Image (spheres, rainbow, N blue to C red):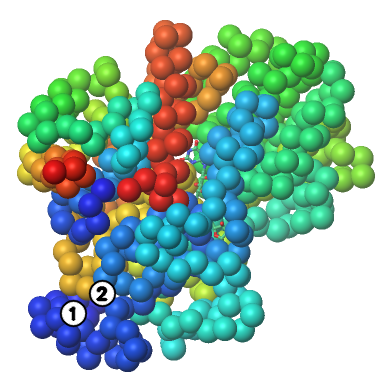
Amino acid sequence: MAADASHGAQIAAACASCHDPSGRGHAIPPITSLDEQTIIKFMHNYRASESSSHVMHAVALSLSEEEIGAVARHLAANVRHRDPP
Amino acid sequence: MTNWTRRQICSMAGGVLAAAAAPHVARSQNKPRVVVIGGGIGGATVARYLGDLKTMDVTLIETKRRYVTCFFSNLYLAGLRSLASLTFGFEVLTERHGLKVIHQAATGVDPGTKTVTLRDGVRLAYDRLVVAAGIAFKSGEIRNYDASAAEIMPHAWNAGPQSELLRRQLESMEDGGVFVIVAPPDPFRCPPAPYERASLVAYYFKQFKPRSKILILDAKDRFSGQELFQEAWGRHYPGMIEWLPRQFTGAVKIVDVAARSVVTEGETFKAAVANIIPAQKAGAIAEKTELTDASGWCPVDPVTFESTLQRGIHVVGDSIIGGDMPKSAFSTNSQAKACAFAIAASLTGSQQFPSHLFNSCYTFLAPDDAFTNAITFTPEGGKIKTVETFISKVGESAEVRRRTAHQAVGWYSAFTADVFGEGS
Ligand SMILES: Cc1cc2nc3c(=O)[nH]c(=O)nc-3n(C[C@H](O)[C@H](O)[C@H](O)COP(=O)(O)OP(=O)(O)OC[C@H]3O[C@@H](n4cnc5c(N)ncnc54)[C@H](O)[C@@H]3O)c2cc1C
């Protein structure tokens, strides 16, 4: 994760408790290669239904639209930093 | 703190004025100093997140050179994980996350002069101190149970040599023996863990010592995840695990180390192997620093995790009065991040956004049968309150439980990478 104290970074810190930042994740999918809109869409789906993951349902319900936007922007921007030009 | 923050914001805007506004900072460097006592889950997380910001000078003090996680140590007891796979060093934190680690015990804190004293007498000055010293055991609640008794009747509630001792005893136990687990009163580290331990040791017995029994003598009348555990015990290990609540026994009062037996109000139970998990309190250095109240735990502000008893000192993890938050590695990690951003805000003028506190634990009933919970919390009226709880249900399909067990393994590797810095 990018090391800053922005709003997105502070929320993304919570993601890192389960999602491996190097994208090595197995069983828990990596989130380091998703674009902003995909992340927002996933979060809305998780918010709507408990069935696929208790944790993500709980997390999605606890975040406001503004917070979802901030974390999605942060995660997506982080991908661009990592990719070789 | 408000004044300090404002002063810092102004000075940061002026860049070089930072040192002038922070009188404690040595002239040779202009970064505010944070000292963290305890390099377990809470301390390592705070130090890593502060180190990554590169705006503070972070020193982590941890006695041990290698940290063994308690989580997944029940899998080790059942022969399902090696201890090496649960062991972490501090090299990545020092090499990649910009912090200094000192392997010594912190022996004293002087909140007046803002210094920490180490075992060798060296004193370290801080602008903010974080204490994440885990748990200590209350002495005297079970008569005769002390450090030397724990070498014969292990607690294995800090992972490492204690876990190895218990594993050796289980391995050399004869088939048909009784494994006694003495479960502690609330609040204690990881509420479902004594019962997870019973489940996984039962799994081991079922394969290698099928005539053996497990007896849980509890200091409580109910426990976390009770329905899920009891349903699984009937399904996986019928007749093997017996749980006796306090109301039946009056709880264990005395241990007889020589006879390897435990004594409740009216009865003596002979054990082939005894695992005594004593009543708990905050880690010793927290008590010595007067961060604890009469309960033995540390009251904190739920937004910044600053002690309400000592200004400038933050406490995270199992040591705190966590309100609705259980004492778990996940909770600790979540608190540590909120604490790190609060410290950064107060020392460097960055902003702390409303924090989100989470807990999510995976608990094994058998190697391919695990359940989870997910809880969200919010600070409210000076306390940490639950917002929502989701938990696995009795009667879920074997496939769902298998998937959860698989996710637990993925969680372990990501989580430990987050704490000890294997990742970015
Ligand atoms: C059997 C078992 C299973 C568990 N399973 C789970 C699980 O599945 N999920 C989960 O989330 N949690 C689980 N936990 C709970 C989890 O291990 C704890 O909640 C977590 O370790 C608490 O972190 P902490 O930083 O408060 O304490 P610790 O991790 O214990 O760290 C404290 C550190 O401080 C150091 N220290 C103390 N005093 C000093 C001093 N004076 N100077 C220098 N260093 C010092 C210690 O050496 C230690 O390394 C489990 C616990 C047990 C016992």
Q: Is residue B150 above or below residue B375?
A: below
Q: Secondary structure at mark 1?
A: helix
Q: Label 1: which residue?
A: B8
Residue B356 badge:
none
* B263, above or below B282, in the image: above
Q: Nearer the viewer, residue B415 or A53?
A: B415
> Residue B347 bears which disc, if any?
2
Quarter where residue B169 is shown: top right
SS category of the residue bearing label 2: helix
Residue B279: image location, x then y, percent: 63, 50
Q: Is residue A66 above or below residue B116?
A: above
Q: Nearer the viewer, residue B150 or B51?
A: B51
Q: Chain of mark 1?
A: B
Q: Residue B285: in sight, yes or no?
A: no
Specify which label sits upstream in the sequence, 2 or 1. 1
Please report contact status of discs 2 and 1: CB closer than 8 Å, yes or no. Answer: yes
Q: Are marks 2 and 1 on the same chain?
A: yes
Give percent across and percent down for residue B72.
55, 35
**Foreground residue, B99 or B181?**
B99
Category of crowding for the residue at label 1, using alpha-carbon neighbours closer than 10 angstroms: few (below 14), some (14–19), many (at least 20): many
> Could you tell me residue B76's position as x and y percent?
64, 32
Q: How many marks?
A: 2
At 27% from the left edge and 19% from the top edge, which residue is drawn? A52
In the figure, is residue A46 to the left or right of B32?
left
User: Picture coordinates of residue B271 (x, y %)?
Assistant: 83, 32
**Label 2 crowding class (10 Å Cα cut-off): few <14, some 14-19, many 20+?**
many
Residue type, label 1: Gln
Residue A74 at least partly seen: yes
